[in-house]
Amino acid sequence: MSENTFNPIDHPHRRYNPLTGQWILVSPHRAKRPWSGQDEKPSTQQLPSYDKECFLCAGNTRISGDKNPDYTGTYVFTNDFAALMTDSPEAPESTNPLFKTQGVRGLSRVICFSPDHSKTLPELPVQSIRAVVDTWNEQIETLGKDYVWVQAFENKGETMGCSQPHPHGQVWANSFLPNEIERKEKHLKEYYQQHNSNLLVDYVQTEIEDGERTVVETEHWIAVVPYWAAWPFETMLLPKTAIRRMSELSEAQRDDLALAIKQLTSRYDNLFQCSFPYSMGWHYAPFFEAGTGIDHWQLHALFYPPLLRSASVRKFMVGYEMLAESQRDLTAEQAAQKLRDVSDVHYKEKS
């Protein structure tokens, strides 16, 4: 191939994210450079199935003084250190456009995925992950009656700032649309109005036909490294049909979702034979006032893992990324291939 002929594997280029309106700089030639930066040693600690010092284990007393029940499945409680308050007053209106303040209301809850202290999400059996799916849905729908946005998410691993190894996630209910959701609402609606079709439904069909960025595909779900991914092994998990919120999923789709999550997160762990850190969460149609159109929305989960070359080398979003725009070395297609090349059966289950 001529040096003057563009090759996405060799030449730097930008990719457009239609969900946010932002561009990503892709520099595949940098993947060949030697690494002499920071190595973060992954934890090799073998955790017990029960830890008497853990605030999330069944039967233990939390720092608030409340005692957890002897739960056997998932368990939900109000966060003892919530970032939001249900009774926060309105902030006074500012007359200076440079110093605006907005009062907010909300609440935060913790979801314990399992009573087993030693098991992360990919290590749980499919039926236990299905229970997590149902709990996500219950919390989203319940809190959505009072709040316009409910963010369900999980931070996995110390690298992602998670100091508590017990498998758990959170839900934060907001009286406002957060920045990411407001931006996505704008671009999804614009696409729907221009094309009379749903952006992510169209995207799923294209990815199914292409296959180059597919990591996991089940009967009802597909996980891909998005064409516009910013993080090295970022993935998006989507249903194959139009689904605006998790509550619209059939029983079969929920069962299959649990399987897809199991396979995707197992591939993550298998990539570097470690407990793969990530932040993940769900996006779906906000809970607008009745009568507001939401057909431009499509349910999807986002996984943002920081690891780059090994279990000890991570991607840092600093410098150019903070001051200009996100940048990645591996192409989305190369990252998807690496994840496809490993098994979807967890390495601990094989051993």
Image (cartoon, rainbow, N blue to C red):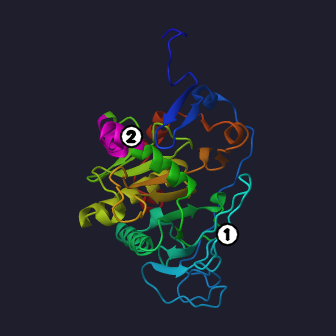
Image position of 58 with respect to 178: above or below:
below
What type is the residue that disc 1 sits on? Ala
Name the spot of residue 158 as percent of width and height, x first.
Answer: 65, 62
- Write the residue at 54% across / 75% down: 110
In this picture, residue 257 sits left or right of residue 38: left
Name the spot of residue 127 as percent of width and height, x first.
Answer: 34, 70
Q: Are marks 2 and 1 in contact (CB under 8 Å)?
A: no
Q: Is residue 207 magenta?
A: yes
Quadrant for residue 141, please give it. bottom left
Decide which of 270, 178 is in the foreground and name it: 178
In this picture, residue 49 sits left or right of residue 297: right
- Write the residue at 43% across / 68% down: 124
In this picture, residue 55 sits left or right of residue 295: right
Q: Which tag, 2 or 1, sits closer to the chain's start? A: 1
Question: Is residue 224 in sight in this rendering?
Answer: no
- Write the residue at 50% across / 16% down: 6
Q: Which residues are magenta?
A: 190-209
Name the spot of residue 327 as percent of width and height, x first.
Answer: 62, 36
